[in-house]
Image (cartoon, grey):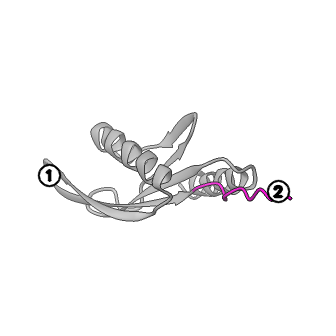
């Protein structure tokens, strides 16, 4: 698990350095605490332990990434609630100077 998490952070560092938007979703309360998903424009890596929760988390992450926001969201599941922390790393704005 530690190697997988280290790989996520290496990918985040690389994406940020290359101005590629990237987001992570982490379970912070509920089943599978600590499970992570990495969301890149062309792929998703990892799982939160439930296919439907993965789909919801990825959709939320992409929406938050477009809005350049990070936040925590609670989702009801059949066996209780799960709280997810969506952390986004949008590319920095481009400044163009004319004149």
For the view shown, which residue lies furthest in the top direction?
42
The residue singled out by tag 1 in the image is 79
On screen, residue 86 versus residue 32, left or right, reads: right
Residue at x 70%, y 51% (from the top left corner): 19
Residue at x 75%, y 55% (from the top left corner): 17
Q: Are marks 2 and 1 in contact (CB under 8 Å)?
A: no
Give the percent coordinates (x, y) of residue 95: 74, 59
The overriding secondary structure of the stretch rendered in magenta is loop
> Which image quadrant is residue 29 in?
bottom left
Badge count: 2
Give the percent coordinates (x, y) of residue 91: 65, 54
For the view shown, which residue lies furthest in the front direction?
99
Q: Nearer the viewer, residue 67 or 37?
A: 67
Relative vertical location of residue 22 with respect to residue 72 in this rendering, above or below: above
The residue singled out by tag 2 in the image is 98
For the view shown, which residue lies furthest in the right direction?
99
- The quadrant of the image that shows the C terminus is bottom right
On screen, residue 81 versus residue 91, left or right, reads: left
Q: Is residue 4 magenta?
A: no
* Front of the two marks 2 and 1: 2
Q: Secondary structure at mark 2?
A: loop
Residue at x 55%, y 35% (from the top left corner): 43
Q: Which residues are magenta?
A: 90-99
Give the percent coordinates (x, y) of residue 69: 46, 62
Q: Nearer the viewer, residue 51 or 55?
A: 55
Q: Residues within 10 Å of mark 1 (few under 14, many from 20)?
A: few
Q: Earlier in the sequence, mark 2 or mark 1?
A: 1
Give the percent coordinates (x, y) of residue 27: 36, 59
Relative vertical location of residue 89 with respect to residue 15 in this rendering, above or below: below
Q: Residues within 10 Å of mark 2 (few under 14, many from 20)?
A: few
């Amino acid at each position: 698990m530690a190697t997988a998490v280290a790989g996520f952070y290496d990918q985040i560092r690389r994406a940020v350095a290359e101005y590629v938007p990237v987001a992570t979703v982490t379970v912070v309360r509920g089943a599978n605490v600590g499970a992570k998903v990495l969301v890149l424009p062309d792929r998703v890596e990892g799982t939160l332990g439930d296919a439907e929760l993965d789909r919801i988390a990825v959709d939320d992450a992409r929406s938050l990434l477009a809005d350049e926001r990070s936040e925590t969201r609670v989702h009801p599941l059949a066996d209780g609630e799960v709280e997810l922390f969506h952390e986004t790393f949008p590319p920095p704005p481009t400044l163009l100077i004319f004149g």
